[in-house]
Image (spheres, coloured by chain):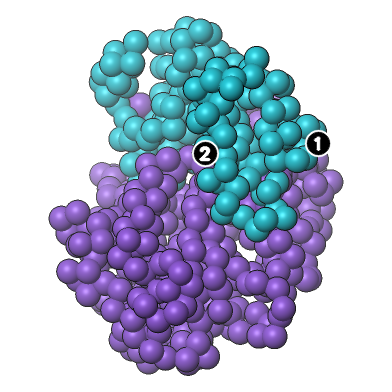
Chain colours: A purple, B cyan
Amino acid sequence: MLPAAEKVITRNWGNPDSWTLEAYRKSGGYQSLEKALGMTPQAVTDEVKKSNLRGRGGAGFPTGLKWSFVPKDSPKPKYLAVNADESEPGTFKDRYILENDPHMLLEGIGIAAFALGVHTAYIYARGEFKFPAERLQRAVDEAYKAGFFGSSVLGKGFALDVFIVRGAGAYICGEETGMLESLEGKKGWPRLKPPFPAVVGLFGAPTVVNNVETLASVPAIIEHGAEWYAKLGTEKSGGTKLICLSGSVKRPGVFEISMRTTVRQLIEDERYGQGMPQGRKVKAVIPGGSSAPVLAANELDVALEFEALKKVDNMAGSGGVIVMDDTTCMVRSLWRVIRFYAEESCGQCTPCREGAPWAARLLRKMEEGRGEAEDLDILLHVAHSIAPFPPIGLGNTICALGDSVALPIHSFVARFRDEFQAHISQHRCPFGDRPWGHYGAFRA
Amino acid sequence: MGSPFFSAEEQRVFDAKLSEIVAHYPADRKSAAMLPALRLLQELKGWLSPDGMLLVAKALDVPPERAYEVATFYVMFHTEKPGKHVVDVCTNLSCSLWGAEELLAYLEAKLGLKAGSSNEKWSLRETECLASCGTAPCLQVDEVHHENLTRGRVDALFEKLS
């Protein structure tokens, strides 16, 4: 049976004017910030640690542990950098948070800043998020006016400034050190780690980088306690999770689910995807944004959760679940995914800069019926040179973008090798001019 | 006072807004304001001309190549003058599964432009995921999202714009 999901992040969505301070306070908003300010910073961090909250941006790192890496005795100022650069294909949950409940994020920022001893927080909003950033700015202005930010938060003497910085269109700035470079006014080239941002981050100072959904989870943890939050999840991952469902499914959208929910349940349940389009079957599902390995139809009984997916050499990533039906071309799909990474490679590391476009050219060649017998091996070799697989995370590049080129290639070819070979042997795409599945035609 | 590049009014807006932005950063980190400063310039002038970038670099006390390097790295910065309206069509996986490739072809025919090119009126670009995957297909016109597109909706939208 499908486990029920508590509404934590989405509890105010759909309320009238849910994005205003008035509406947020009506539902108890900012009481957690007040509660936190009455605790010690260490107690707040401990609570977040005990809650088993894990980062929702992609890597799933335990949030409380990340906070505890910040040196307590640093003479430099400390920073909180909020990652609102949501750009992973298939992912749109943070945008919904910014649009529907920006104050939940802002309250989380206030609590985190207090726990960390941070007096300046920057929210790096994706350049393309003009409307979400404007709505967020209005919320920031409201929060200042109400005394939740400023020189003395709630009159308790704790100072906090929050600034929004908009990006300008570069996927790589979602990578935490690429984002820090961009915040420093540079092109978004990721940094070699270590040192990690907690030690040397923004402006050379200790910095915590947290995702929007991660920080938006913090007020509920303070309100209901770590134990309550931990219990919502699994042994190692507390809370609920936002999932972005897209592709060939009857009802795409953002859903807050229990971490015990499987891919199949997400697609089929009436509360979520409501099943496949009439007469269609699942062919492939990407479970965690387009960087994640693809799953075939016989692998859907895995829970959409960090540990469960890790066990099958996959990743929960950013929560972007993309469904492809049995009339979708796998070569065309992989080509489109790889084109994205070729476009977004920052150019710093050779395996990624040269490998991604090379892989895209090979896939184009296959899809257009010009593939040769050895191309599939060359493709796998290129992928292997960027990052071997499995396991995930052994890439030969400074950041994980390289892995994101390699993982889709390895996984698509491993599961759909026959289809790649058919493209080569038939000298054409077997799907002809309808490669995109049930909904793939532009509607009138 | 205006410069040959800015009108007096533009200069006033540029200076006022820039000093507000610069105040968000540590005093010795003025150059951190590069992205917002270039955005401000683009809002005032429509694009980032070499003269404009020179001016931004000067205002932030960095060499001009720093401005250039940043301007050319980010796709939303226009280092060539775009059309009056910039149309960004997402064709990433989730959108293509909902007809985005045909949407782009439809727009190419409708506007008489190949993706990646511009005329006075339009710049048409194929772009990457716009975080509208659940409301695909989608596009942005001048940074504003339009989602759940159909031929009818596209026609209505572009009629309003032209």
Determine whether B148 is above or below A308 in the image.
above
Three-letter amino acid code at the position of disc 1 = Pro
Answer with mark 1 or mark 2, whichever residue precedes in sequence: 2
In the displayed structure, does residue B156 sit left or right of residue A357? left
**Relative image position of residue A289 (x, y in whole percent):** 51, 55
Instruction: Name, please, the residue furthest toward the front.
Output: B1
In x, y percent, where is residue A263?
40, 64
A117 to the left or right of A369: left
User: Where residue B131 appears, x then y in whole percent?
Assistant: 44, 45
Report the residue at 33% width, 81% height from top.
A34
**B78 lies left or right of A39:** right
Task: Identify the chain of the residue marked 2, using the numbered disc in the image.
Answer: B
User: What is the distance, in whole Å, between disc 1 and disc 2 at their CAs?
Assistant: 21 Å
Q: Which residue is mark 1?
A: B63
Q: Residue at x 60, y 78 (%)?
A: A66
Q: Is residue A235 above or below residue B104?
A: below
Spot occupied by residue A279 in the image (x, y as percentages of width and height): 28, 44
| Number of numbered discs visible in the structure rendering | 2
Q: Which quadrant, please, contains the C terminus of chain A?
A: top left
Q: Label 2 sits on what residue type? A: Lys
* Label 1: chain letter: B
Q: Which mark is residue B17?
A: 2
